[in-house]
Amino acid sequence: MDQVIAAIRKELTENSDPSIRESSKRFFKEEITCYGMKTATVTAIAKKYWKEIRSQEKYDIFALCEELYRSGYLEEAFIVSTWVPSLSDRFEPGDLSVFEYWIDRWITNWAACDGFCNHAVGELITKFPDQVVQLKRWAASPNRWMRRAACVSLIVPAKHGEFLSDVFELADLVLIDQDAMVQKGYGWLLKEASRKHIPEVFAYVMQNRAVMPRTALRYAIELMPQELKSEAMKKG
Protein backbone atom coordinates (compact mmCIF):
# COMPACT_ATOMS: atom_id res chain seq x y z
CA MET A 1 0.00 0.00 0.00
CA ASP A 2 3.02 2.26 0.42
CA GLN A 3 3.40 2.12 -3.35
CA VAL A 4 -0.08 3.60 -3.75
CA ILE A 5 0.78 6.57 -1.55
CA ALA A 6 4.06 7.08 -3.40
CA ALA A 7 2.32 6.92 -6.79
CA ILE A 8 -0.36 9.39 -5.71
CA ARG A 9 2.22 11.86 -4.43
CA LYS A 10 4.24 11.51 -7.62
CA GLU A 11 1.18 12.41 -9.71
CA LEU A 12 0.26 15.30 -7.44
CA THR A 13 3.79 16.66 -7.71
CA GLU A 14 3.84 16.28 -11.49
CA ASN A 15 0.53 18.16 -11.79
CA SER A 16 1.40 20.95 -9.38
CA ASP A 17 1.23 24.53 -10.64
CA PRO A 18 3.04 27.29 -8.72
CA SER A 19 0.58 29.94 -9.90
CA ILE A 20 -2.42 27.95 -8.64
CA ARG A 21 -0.55 27.25 -5.42
CA GLU A 22 -0.13 30.96 -4.78
CA SER A 23 -3.64 31.93 -5.82
CA SER A 24 -5.17 29.21 -3.62
CA LYS A 25 -3.75 30.80 -0.50
CA ARG A 26 -5.96 33.86 -0.78
CA PHE A 27 -9.01 31.77 0.15
CA PHE A 28 -7.60 31.00 3.59
CA LYS A 29 -6.70 33.15 6.58
CA GLU A 30 -4.63 30.33 8.07
CA GLU A 31 -1.47 28.96 6.51
CA ILE A 32 -2.07 26.09 4.09
CA THR A 33 0.22 23.64 2.35
CA CYS A 34 -0.82 22.66 -1.15
CA TYR A 35 0.60 21.38 -4.43
CA GLY A 36 -1.49 23.83 -6.43
CA MET A 37 -3.90 22.29 -8.91
CA LYS A 38 -7.50 22.40 -10.04
CA THR A 39 -10.03 20.42 -8.04
CA ALA A 40 -10.99 18.39 -11.11
CA THR A 41 -7.41 17.15 -11.42
CA VAL A 42 -7.30 16.04 -7.79
CA THR A 43 -10.66 14.31 -8.16
CA ALA A 44 -9.45 12.43 -11.24
CA ILE A 45 -6.36 11.22 -9.37
CA ALA A 46 -8.48 10.17 -6.39
CA LYS A 47 -10.85 8.18 -8.61
CA LYS A 48 -7.98 6.54 -10.48
CA TYR A 49 -6.41 5.17 -7.31
CA TRP A 50 -9.76 4.32 -5.73
CA LYS A 51 -10.12 1.66 -8.41
CA GLU A 52 -6.90 0.11 -7.12
CA ILE A 53 -7.76 0.08 -3.44
CA ARG A 54 -11.55 -0.25 -3.21
CA SER A 55 -11.40 -4.04 -2.71
CA GLN A 56 -9.09 -3.67 0.31
CA GLU A 57 -10.34 -4.06 3.88
CA LYS A 58 -11.99 -0.91 5.19
CA TYR A 59 -9.45 -0.33 7.93
CA ASP A 60 -6.58 -0.75 5.47
CA ILE A 61 -8.17 2.03 3.43
CA PHE A 62 -8.55 4.09 6.61
CA ALA A 63 -4.82 3.62 7.22
CA LEU A 64 -4.09 5.00 3.75
CA CYS A 65 -6.35 7.95 4.48
CA GLU A 66 -4.50 8.70 7.68
CA GLU A 67 -1.19 8.60 5.83
CA LEU A 68 -2.56 11.11 3.32
CA TYR A 69 -3.75 13.38 6.12
CA ARG A 70 -0.38 13.13 7.82
CA SER A 71 1.30 15.03 4.97
CA GLY A 72 -0.64 18.21 5.67
CA TYR A 73 -1.26 18.85 1.97
CA LEU A 74 -4.71 20.14 1.08
CA GLU A 75 -5.00 17.99 -2.05
CA GLU A 76 -4.21 14.83 -0.10
CA ALA A 77 -7.00 15.72 2.34
CA PHE A 78 -9.31 16.13 -0.67
CA ILE A 79 -8.47 12.60 -1.77
CA VAL A 80 -9.58 11.32 1.63
CA SER A 81 -12.81 13.32 1.24
CA THR A 82 -13.38 11.59 -2.12
CA TRP A 83 -12.54 8.07 -0.98
CA VAL A 84 -14.33 7.75 2.35
CA PRO A 85 -17.92 8.43 1.19
CA SER A 86 -17.41 5.59 -1.30
CA LEU A 87 -17.16 3.30 1.73
CA SER A 88 -20.58 4.31 3.06
CA ASP A 89 -22.08 0.87 2.49
CA ARG A 90 -19.42 -0.46 4.88
CA PHE A 91 -19.84 2.23 7.53
CA GLU A 92 -20.42 1.17 11.14
CA PRO A 93 -21.31 3.45 14.07
CA GLY A 94 -17.83 3.05 15.53
CA ASP A 95 -16.28 4.61 12.44
CA LEU A 96 -17.38 7.99 13.77
CA SER A 97 -14.67 7.79 16.42
CA VAL A 98 -12.10 7.35 13.65
CA PHE A 99 -13.48 10.36 11.83
CA GLU A 100 -13.45 12.38 15.03
CA TYR A 101 -9.77 11.60 15.53
CA TRP A 102 -8.93 12.66 11.98
CA ILE A 103 -10.78 15.95 12.27
CA ASP A 104 -9.29 16.76 15.66
CA ARG A 105 -5.76 15.75 14.70
CA TRP A 106 -5.37 16.54 11.02
CA ILE A 107 -7.91 19.08 9.77
CA THR A 108 -6.67 22.67 9.90
CA ASN A 109 -8.74 24.62 7.37
CA TRP A 110 -12.35 25.09 6.28
CA ALA A 111 -11.94 23.35 2.90
CA ALA A 112 -10.66 20.08 4.37
CA CYS A 113 -13.27 20.28 7.13
CA ASP A 114 -16.24 20.86 4.84
CA GLY A 115 -15.11 18.46 2.13
CA PHE A 116 -14.87 15.60 4.60
CA CYS A 117 -17.77 16.39 6.91
CA ASN A 118 -20.42 17.32 4.34
CA HIS A 119 -20.28 13.85 2.82
CA ALA A 120 -18.35 11.27 4.84
CA VAL A 121 -19.63 12.26 8.29
CA GLY A 122 -23.01 13.33 6.94
CA GLU A 123 -23.56 9.96 5.28
CA LEU A 124 -22.63 8.09 8.45
CA ILE A 125 -25.07 10.18 10.51
CA THR A 126 -27.80 9.61 7.94
CA LYS A 127 -27.17 5.87 8.11
CA PHE A 128 -27.00 5.82 11.91
CA PRO A 129 -29.16 8.73 13.11
CA ASP A 130 -28.60 7.97 16.79
CA GLN A 131 -24.97 8.99 16.32
CA VAL A 132 -26.03 12.64 15.89
CA VAL A 133 -25.59 12.96 19.65
CA GLN A 134 -21.83 12.78 19.09
CA LEU A 135 -21.95 15.95 17.01
CA LYS A 136 -23.36 17.80 20.00
CA ARG A 137 -20.33 16.69 21.98
CA TRP A 138 -18.06 17.97 19.21
CA ALA A 139 -19.76 21.36 19.49
CA ALA A 140 -18.17 21.79 22.92
CA SER A 141 -14.63 21.01 21.72
CA PRO A 142 -11.83 23.56 22.23
CA ASN A 143 -10.83 22.81 18.61
CA ARG A 144 -12.50 25.30 16.25
CA TRP A 145 -12.56 22.73 13.44
CA MET A 146 -14.36 20.18 15.60
CA ARG A 147 -16.99 22.80 16.42
CA ARG A 148 -17.39 23.70 12.73
CA ALA A 149 -17.47 19.98 11.88
CA ALA A 150 -20.34 19.46 14.31
CA CYS A 151 -22.44 21.84 12.22
CA VAL A 152 -21.35 21.21 8.66
CA SER A 153 -21.73 17.43 9.04
CA LEU A 154 -25.51 17.92 8.86
CA ILE A 155 -25.46 20.21 5.81
CA VAL A 156 -26.65 17.61 3.28
CA PRO A 157 -29.40 16.00 5.39
CA ALA A 158 -30.56 19.46 6.54
CA LYS A 159 -30.83 20.51 2.89
CA HIS A 160 -33.32 17.67 2.45
CA GLY A 161 -35.35 18.72 5.47
CA GLU A 162 -33.95 16.16 7.92
CA PHE A 163 -32.65 16.51 11.51
CA LEU A 164 -34.35 19.87 12.08
CA SER A 165 -34.48 19.61 15.86
CA ASP A 166 -30.82 18.59 15.91
CA VAL A 167 -29.96 21.54 13.66
CA PHE A 168 -31.45 23.89 16.25
CA GLU A 169 -29.75 22.09 19.14
CA LEU A 170 -26.37 22.41 17.43
CA ALA A 171 -26.99 26.07 16.68
CA ASP A 172 -27.88 26.62 20.35
CA LEU A 173 -24.59 25.04 21.42
CA VAL A 174 -22.45 27.39 19.31
CA LEU A 175 -24.84 30.34 19.19
CA ILE A 176 -22.44 32.91 20.65
CA ASP A 177 -19.20 31.26 19.54
CA GLN A 178 -16.60 33.95 18.88
CA ASP A 179 -14.86 32.09 16.05
CA ALA A 180 -15.90 33.27 12.58
CA MET A 181 -15.36 29.81 11.09
CA VAL A 182 -17.84 28.35 13.55
CA GLN A 183 -20.31 31.20 13.03
CA LYS A 184 -20.22 30.65 9.28
CA GLY A 185 -20.60 26.90 9.80
CA TYR A 186 -23.77 27.05 11.84
CA GLY A 187 -25.17 29.92 9.79
CA TRP A 188 -24.69 27.76 6.69
CA LEU A 189 -26.42 24.87 8.44
CA LEU A 190 -29.43 27.04 9.26
CA LYS A 191 -29.49 28.31 5.67
CA GLU A 192 -29.65 24.78 4.29
CA ALA A 193 -32.35 23.84 6.80
CA SER A 194 -34.37 26.85 5.59
CA ARG A 195 -34.73 25.28 2.15
CA LYS A 196 -37.48 23.04 3.55
CA HIS A 197 -38.28 24.87 6.79
CA ILE A 198 -38.33 28.64 6.24
CA PRO A 199 -40.92 29.42 8.97
CA GLU A 200 -39.08 27.40 11.61
CA VAL A 201 -35.64 28.78 10.79
CA PHE A 202 -36.97 32.32 10.59
CA ALA A 203 -38.59 31.91 14.03
CA TYR A 204 -35.28 30.61 15.40
CA VAL A 205 -33.38 33.56 13.97
CA MET A 206 -35.88 36.08 15.34
CA GLN A 207 -35.79 34.46 18.75
CA ASN A 208 -31.99 34.62 18.89
CA ARG A 209 -31.01 37.60 16.75
CA ALA A 210 -30.19 39.77 19.77
CA VAL A 211 -27.21 37.52 20.58
CA MET A 212 -26.53 35.78 17.26
CA PRO A 213 -23.37 37.12 15.57
CA ARG A 214 -24.23 39.04 12.40
CA THR A 215 -22.06 36.71 10.34
CA ALA A 216 -24.16 33.71 11.35
CA LEU A 217 -27.41 35.62 10.96
CA ARG A 218 -26.61 36.75 7.41
CA TYR A 219 -25.77 33.20 6.38
CA ALA A 220 -28.93 31.82 7.99
CA ILE A 221 -31.32 34.14 6.15
CA GLU A 222 -29.59 34.13 2.76
CA LEU A 223 -32.26 32.05 0.99
CA MET A 224 -35.27 33.71 2.59
CA PRO A 225 -37.66 36.14 0.86
CA GLN A 226 -36.53 39.77 1.01
CA GLU A 227 -39.24 40.80 3.46
CA LEU A 228 -38.08 38.19 5.97
CA LYS A 229 -34.45 39.17 5.47
CA SER A 230 -35.31 42.80 6.13
CA GLU A 231 -37.24 41.91 9.28
CA ALA A 232 -34.40 39.76 10.60
CA MET A 233 -31.81 42.46 9.96
CA LYS A 234 -33.74 45.21 11.72
CA LYS A 235 -31.98 46.64 14.73
CA GLY A 236 -33.59 46.76 18.14
Image: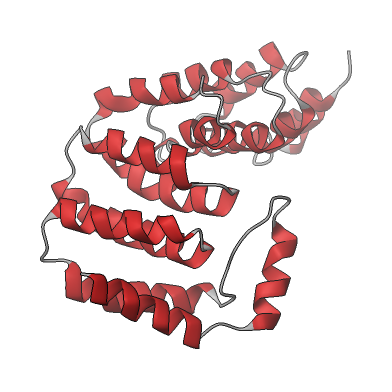
Taking depth in this image into account, of 51 and 3 the one nearest to the observer is 3
Specify the color scheme: secondary structure
Which residue: 33% across, 53% down?
66
Q: Quadrant of residue 128?
A: top left
The quarter of the rendered structure image containing the C terminus is: top right
The percent position of residue 57, horizontal first and vertical second, equals 11, 57
> In the rendered view, would you say 176 is above or below 58?
above
Residue 224 appears anywhere in the view: no
Q: In this rendering, is residue 104 above or below 108?
A: above
Residue depicted at x 68% and y 55%: 31
Give left or right: position of 218 versus 91: right
Query: Residue placed at 59% from the left, 37% from the top?
Result: 185
x%, y% of residue 234? 86, 22
Q: How far from the left and from the top, in percent, is residue 9? A: 41, 76
The percent position of residue 18, horizontal first and vertical second, equals 66, 82
Q: Is residue 171 left or right of residue 224?
A: left
Depicted 21 relative to depicted 65: above or below: below
Q: Looking at the image, which is closer to me, 230 or 137?
A: 137
